[in-house]
Amino acid sequence: ISTLRRFIYTLSREHTRRDVENTTKYPKLHLLLRNLGKNIPELKKSRKKALTVDLIHKMCSTCNDKLVDRRDKALLMLMFASGGRRRSEIVNLQMDDVENKNDGFILTFKNTKNGDDLTVPIEGKAANSLTEWLHSSKISEGAVFRSLIGNKKIGAKLNDRWVHQIVKTRLKKAGINPEGYSSHSIRSGFVTSCAEAGITLAQTMSLSAHKTHQIALDYYRPGDLVLNPATIIME
């Protein structure tokens, strides 16, 4: 079913690009996909563990001053701080989409999964890590995140598989069992961390850009329970 969803997503983006009626949006199609996931056990999508803010910091603590370390740290922090960006969105980020703003940046992610452009601010530690990577790599045009040749020479832009591998590698280095985690864990971890911090779902979704409240709530609720006053009603 995941392969089927990817095909439909690709078709949907092409419909949008050509500005024609998007037949992949038909309600009956989405109802069919939902029923497949619910009624056939082996097709149910497994829920990945959430990489919350504390785990992201642990992963980043394994990064030193090598070029590869600065790249990995900037990538992980940027994916998280920008709303839990999907790996396809982070690898397609271009220098033309990066604007300096005071002590941080304004990033524009083009043609996200929803088909829209998304502009988000980046400040604090995430902005500092991006500054260090860009300064060290001397990247001024093209893709922001690139492969490295011998930890010195800048190569082509990263692909989705590289991002997945970076997540797994940094988890291992941080002493965290990578089983059950993926790059998508950063997205769910962002929403979960926002809930734990008492940030409203609306504020969270303004960065995560989840298409529906229901999808975001699937990740928001576990974190929200931590602060829910109803859990101490008997105290």
Image: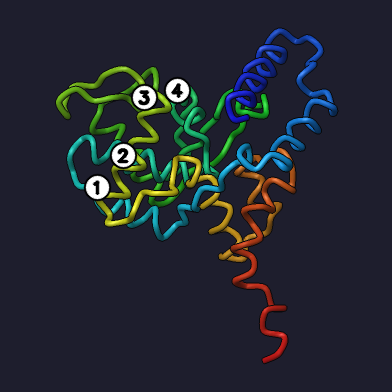
Pointers 1 and 2 in contact (CB under 8 A)?
yes
Q: Nearer the viewer, residue 92 or 98?
A: 92
Q: Which mark is residue 63?
A: 1
Q: Residue at x 69, y 53 (%)?
A: 217
SS class, disc 4:
loop
Q: What residue is shown with label 4?
A: 94
Q: Is residue 121 above or below residue 222?
A: above
Pointers 4 and 3 in contact (CB under 8 A)?
no
Q: CA distance from mark 3 to mark 1?
A: 18 Å
SS class, disc 2:
helix
Q: CA distance from mark 4 to mark 3?
A: 12 Å
Q: CA distance from mark 4 to mark 1?
A: 23 Å
Point out the frontmost of discs 4 and 2.
2
Residue 136 left/right relative to 231: left
Q: Residue at x 51, y 29 (%)?
A: 89
SS class, disc 3:
loop
Please tell me which of labels 1 and 2 falls first in the chain: 1
Q: Quadrant of residue 197?
A: bottom right
Q: Nearer the viewer, residue 218 or 131?
A: 218
Pointers 2 and 3 in contact (CB under 8 A)?
no
Amino acid type indicated by mark 3: Leu
Please tell me which of labels 4 and 2 falls first in the chain: 2
Amino acid type indicated by mark 2: Asp
Please tell me which of labels 2 and 3 falls first in the chain: 2
Q: What residue is shown with label 3?
A: 158
Q: If the image is split into quadrants, where does the N terminus sit?
A: top right
